[in-house]
Image (spheres, coloured by chain):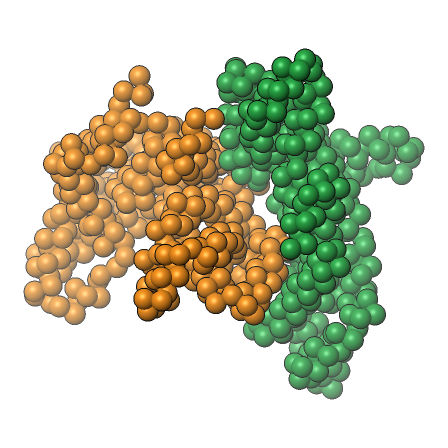
Chain colours: A green, B orange
């Protein structure tokens, strides 16, 4: 099962980067023009153009690209003038940490809020949480981010409004540096996580309510199980299963970069890297970024599937067919 | 209290407001139409060359101001949706539609109107500024073409107006002295417009303030609603066509085509759609229509999945088989057998899709890749307001709230439609 999934994922990834490769090459415009000043002699200009390898026939370029790809080489970034892989490695760790933190916040907050609201269905807390989740889901992230900056940075002056660290951090020790980073990340995390919390809350609340209404819960209650035990051992494992595949997709998409949040708060993440690469026509970097984010989406999906099968062995049968 | 009001009461109330505040404008646009028809008979080629979108826009709005209330008064008893009670969602949707249809009548300024920028820039909401009207050098000739041009200047709002001057204060003596930001300007009396022996000095009120170029934020909001709705509808339509046809194409024959199209769908799902949209817009240039088409192309995947799975499950049904055996063509099968069945999930999906497209359009405008600076857009307004965050909160809050209410309304509308199609969900 796993093997077949991996194969089809690799095919999808291959399709993705080939599609991108041809789209970029066939689009109007020449990225090498940016590096050729009009004072350059024609021979030198031709040499520069040659170094980009954009003159040779398309299929030849594709062949070189594939051969290089096999050895894990995406080429050299046009703007940074270093290998694409090392450029990505500068930006990827931040995105990984940031998205994982946001993901954990989304999942835990959604989980506990839905548990609280499901305790008394139709109660005051339940209703107000549901309304709040609708509001949080409809708030555009850029509006939310700007409002947060307005309130917390410019009016109250509690949190910094942009960047990832302060200017004079050289004299700081490890703990101070950590505190500095975390104060910089508070507003971006709120901006990125709020709509996710609403999504998970909605999903989990519906699932939990469904499971609570099933006959086996009534049976357990009749048998004298405590409410706590029912919730913990029977309801939650049943309700959480459909969530895992959603969470897998969401985490993968988070890993490709939270573009809007990064733009608002000026964070060095994959989203901004990708968009800057697109806007500056840095072809190798675009392909590299897309490859990495696509691979991460596929890997997280696979992990979600494995966890799902671990929790419920019956699903394996369905996947095999 | 708000629950007692029915939808047609609300709509009629809005029209009464429109008629009360903009009666002269509506009347003038009818007169303009009359003159234009006269011009059409007299000088056909001139009339055609004067035809523009803004002219058609305001005349058709003026017509709809009368037609829609008449239609509602006649048919309100028969049409079910007009007799529903007003909820917050419906209120927002009605206001958006009114903005969409009547933008030139609701606003009293062109969204791009700029004049005396140093005077009018970054004015807070509800602030007013003095306006002195200058005598315009219009020809008094009673030629029908000149009359048409004069009337058109009166009705259709331009991005400039040479006959007015904004000022902090005006002092009248033997000549008019105008103070603008501490600077003094002198206008001789014979350049100023007089009515009943007095110079015409009015006050202009900016409801939601002005932005950094002195443009009226309220009119930009109204026109922004237009762009938002237009882009949303257009790209949802593109998504619908793509998702429906591809889904049917993949599921109906099955086999290799199915695998290919499904893999391509997976490919599009394996990275965030916004990157794809930005890529296409950056490579091929952005205009209103490319934005609509690209946003449509980025959103067909969920629809494709719904249609494909429904058609695959339908393929084993007897009536589907008999329809095929009876010799119905693929197109007939799609419209007669498949579409009625999948209508409910498709419509619900489309409404949610609509919300996400509006959000994506605003996000693109926020990133500076939207429909261009020619059309006002909520996202672009927030983006420009970000630079004046500490000085001018009114540049951000109104467009942000508009966007928020629109998205909220789209989401809850999707929920309501879902409940309407699956009444069983209500019992839980």
Query: Going by the image, does B427 lie left or right of A84?
Result: left
Q: Quadrant of residue B100?
A: top left
Seen from the viewer's position, the closer of residues A166 and A268 is A268
Q: Is residue B200 above or below residue A115?
A: below
What x and y, as percent, mark residue B404?
47, 35
Q: Residue at x 84, y 33 (%)?
A: A178
Q: Is residue A137 above or below residue B323?
A: above
What x and y, as percent, mark residue A287?
69, 64
Q: Quadrant of residue A234?
A: top right
Q: Residue at x 57, y 67 (%)?
A: B260
Seen from the viewer's position, the closer of residues B6 and B243 is B243
What x and y, as percent, mark residue A305?
70, 47
Q: Residue at x 71, y 60 (%)?
A: A4
Q: Is residue A263 above or below residue B286?
A: above
Residue B420 seen by the camera:
yes
Placement of the N terminus of chain B among the 4 image quadrants = top left
């Amino acid at each position: 099962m796993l093997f077949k999934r991996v194969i089809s994922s690799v095919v999808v990834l291959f399709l993705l980067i080939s599609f991108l490769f041809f789209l970029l090459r066939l689009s109007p415009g020449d990225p090498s023009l940016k590096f050729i000043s009009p004072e350059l002699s024609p021979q030198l200009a031709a040499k520069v153009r040659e170094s980009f390898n954009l003159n040779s026939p398309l299929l030849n370029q594709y062949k070189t690209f594939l051969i290089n790809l096999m050895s894990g080489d995406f080429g050299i970034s046009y703007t940074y003038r270093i290998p694409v892989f090392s450029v990505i490695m500068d930006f990827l760790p931040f995105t990984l940490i940031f998205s994982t933190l946001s993901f954990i916040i989304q999942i835990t907050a959604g989980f506990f809020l839905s548990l609280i609201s499901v305790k008394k269905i139709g109660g005051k807390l339940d209703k107000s949480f549901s309304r709040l989740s609708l509001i949080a889901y409809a708030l555009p992230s850029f509006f939310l981010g700007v409002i947060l900056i307005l309130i917390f940075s410019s009016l109250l002056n509690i949190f910094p409004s942009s960047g990832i660290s302060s200017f004079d951090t050289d004299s700081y020790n490890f703990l101070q540096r950590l505190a500095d980073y975390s104060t910089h990340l508070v507003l971006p995390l709120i901006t990125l996580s709020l709509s996710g919390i609403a999504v998970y809350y909605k999903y989990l609340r519906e699932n939990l309510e469904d499971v609570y209404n099933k006959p086996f819960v009534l049976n357990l209650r009749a048998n004298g199980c405590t409410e706590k035990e029912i919730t913990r051992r029977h309801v939650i494992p049943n309700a959480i299963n459909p969530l895992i595949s959603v969470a897998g997709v969401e985490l993968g998409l988070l890993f490709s970069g939270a573009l809007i949040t990064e733009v608002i708060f000026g964070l060095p993440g994959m989203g901004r890297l990708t968009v800057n690469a697109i806007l500056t026509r840095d072809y190798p970097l675009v392909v590299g970024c897309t490859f990495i984010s696509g691979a991460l989406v596929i890997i997280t999906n696979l992990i979600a599937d494995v966890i799902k099968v671990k929790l419920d062995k019956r699903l394996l049968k369905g996947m095999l067919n | 209290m708000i629950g007692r009001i029915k939808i047609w009461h609300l709509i009629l109330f809005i029209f009464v407001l429109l008629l009360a505040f903009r009666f002269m404008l509506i009347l003038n646009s009818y007169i303009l139409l009359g003159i234009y028809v006269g011009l059409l008979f007299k000088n056909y080629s001139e009339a055609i060359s004067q035809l523009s979108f803004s002219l058609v826009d305001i005349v058709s709005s003026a017509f709809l101001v009368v037609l829609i209330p008449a239609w509602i008064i006649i048919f309100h008893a028969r049409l079910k949706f007009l007799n529903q009670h007003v909820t917050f969602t419906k209120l927002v949707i009605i206001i958006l539609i009114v903005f969409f249809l009547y933008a030139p009548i609701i606003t009293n300024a062109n969204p791009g109107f700029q004049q005396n920028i140093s005077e009018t820039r970054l004015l807070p909401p509800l602030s007013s500024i003095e306006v002195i009207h200058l005598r315009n050098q219009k020809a008094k000739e009673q030629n029908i073409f000149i009359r048409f041009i004069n009337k058109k200047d009166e009705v259709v709002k331009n991005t400039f107006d040479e006959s007015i001057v904004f000022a902090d204060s005006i002092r009248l003596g033997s000549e008019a002295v105008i103070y603008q930001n501490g600077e003094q300007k002198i206008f001789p009396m014979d350049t100023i417009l007089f009515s009943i022996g007095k110079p015409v000095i009015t006050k202009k009120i900016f409801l939601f303030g002005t932005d950094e170029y002195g443009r009226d934020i309220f009119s930009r909001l109204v026109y922004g609603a237009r762009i938002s709705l237009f882009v949303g509808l257009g790209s949802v339509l593109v998504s619908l066509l793509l998702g429906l046809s591809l889904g049917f194409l993949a599921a109906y024959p099955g086999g290799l085509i199915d695998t290919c199209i499904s893999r391509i769908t997976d490919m599009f799902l394996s990275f965030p759609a916004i990157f794809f949209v930005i890529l296409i817009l950056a490579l091929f240039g952005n205009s209103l229509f490319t934005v609509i088409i690209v946003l449509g192309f980025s959103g067909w995947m969920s629809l494709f999945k719904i249609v494909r799975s429904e058609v695959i499950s339908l393929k084993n049904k007897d009536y589907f088989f008999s329809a095929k055996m009876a010799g119905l063509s693929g197109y007939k099968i799609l419209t007669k057998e498949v579409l009625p069945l999948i209508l409910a999930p498709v419509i619900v999906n489309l409404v949610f899709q609509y919300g996400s497209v509006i959000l994506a359009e605003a996000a693109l405008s926020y990133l500076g890749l939207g429909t261009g600076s020619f059309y006002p857009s909520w996202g672009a307004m927030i983006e420009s307001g970000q630079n004046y965050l500490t000085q001018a909160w009114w540049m951000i809050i109104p467009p942000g709230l508009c966007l928020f209410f629109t998205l909220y309304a789209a989401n809850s509308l999707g929920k309501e439609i879902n409940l309407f199609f699956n009444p069983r969900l209500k019992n839980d």
